[in-house]
Amino acid sequence: MSNEIRKFGDRRDAKLCRDITGMAQICIDLKPKRSLGELYVNQKYDVTNLVEYINKYKKIRDEENKITYFHAFVTAVAKVIYNRPLLNRFVANRHVYEHNDVSLSFVMKTEFNDKSEEIMVITPVEKDDNIFTVSDKIRSKVNKVRKKGDTGKGANDAIQIIGKLPNLIRVPIVGLFKFLDQKGLLPGFLVEDNLYYSSMVLSNIGTLKCGGIYHNVTDFGTCSGLITMGEIKEEVVKENGKDVTKYYCEFGVTIDERIADGFYMIKSLQLLQYILNRPELLEGRADEKIEN
């Protein structure tokens, strides 16, 4: 958590951005809801080097300490956010804020079947984290849920209780929470482990043999984007007149266009490809400055 002194207008979880241009503010006024500012991008990335990188660590790390594509995905996105800080912003009550921390979230199933419970998981990525520490964090949280049945506290517990209330009681409560959310006054127990209060939501749907899809963002919370990682597939392409086998992966990106202009977004996606092409960068600090 940031130790900076909170200034007037700041929230407990974010600082007010005071560098917003007139055009950006008018855009927010014309599109006051996050769902009205959704920008969809589908990117197909060459992940050949990443596949080789992961395969290398499969040979030298045991099953309990393995590094997965999702771990690499999480770390790469965190590095992009540290290098492109406008991605860590959100709009609330027609003001733009920047998160105090970088945190990435995902939904996991407690068991591998259709009826198992879904749990929200948030992974904070500190400035000095890298793929190894991020991998440890994710693995630790997943193991707690799947081996010990520990679903954590906070929003996960609240959802199970409130979600089972009758409409007459539940709807007004949810309405109150949405109002408090816009004012930045939502109780802490509803923010803890709440994926809607993270920098970015990530989803690995490649395990389901699916390509990168678009998923809507929500007007609730402070998360401005969602990225899905599709299945990694082999393709034969021509290089210097020869057939070469490459690995490609589709990414579906949905992001609130009000936090940054299109040029900034495209440069950020190019940086993600740059990192995936050079997976050794994942071993450096999350906040390492990358020039591409």
Image (tube, grey):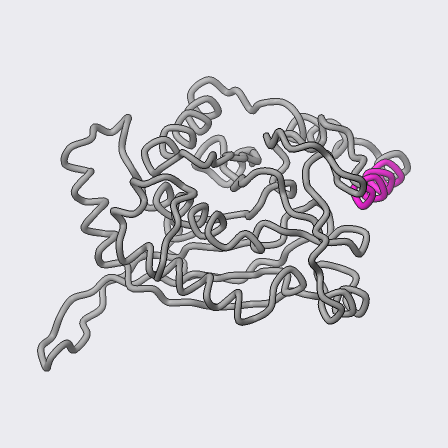
The residue lying at 71 percent from left, 66 percent from top is 21
255 or 96, nearer to the observer: 96
Residue 2 lies, in percent from the top left, at: 60, 32
Residue 3 lies, in percent from the top left, at: 62, 29
The residue lying at 45 percent from left, 46 percent from top is 78
Q: Is 284 left or right of 260, judged from the image as shown?
A: left
**Magenta-colored span:** 171-183
Q: Is 189 left or right of 275, judged from the image as shown?
A: right
Quadrant housing residue 39: bottom right
9 or 195, nearer to the observer: 9
Residue 133 lies, in percent from the top left, at: 36, 31
184 to 96, vertically: above or below: above
What is the chief secondary structure element of the magenta stretch?
A: helix
258 to 223, vertically: above or below: below
How many numbered markers are drawn? Answer: 0
Image quarter where the C terminus lies is bottom left
Q: Is residue 187 visible?
A: yes
Residue 135 in magenta stretch:
no
The residue lying at 56 percent from left, 24 percent from top is 151
Residue 172 in magenta stretch:
yes
Residue 207 lies, in percent from the top left, at: 37, 48
Residue lying at the far bottom in this picture: please name it. 241
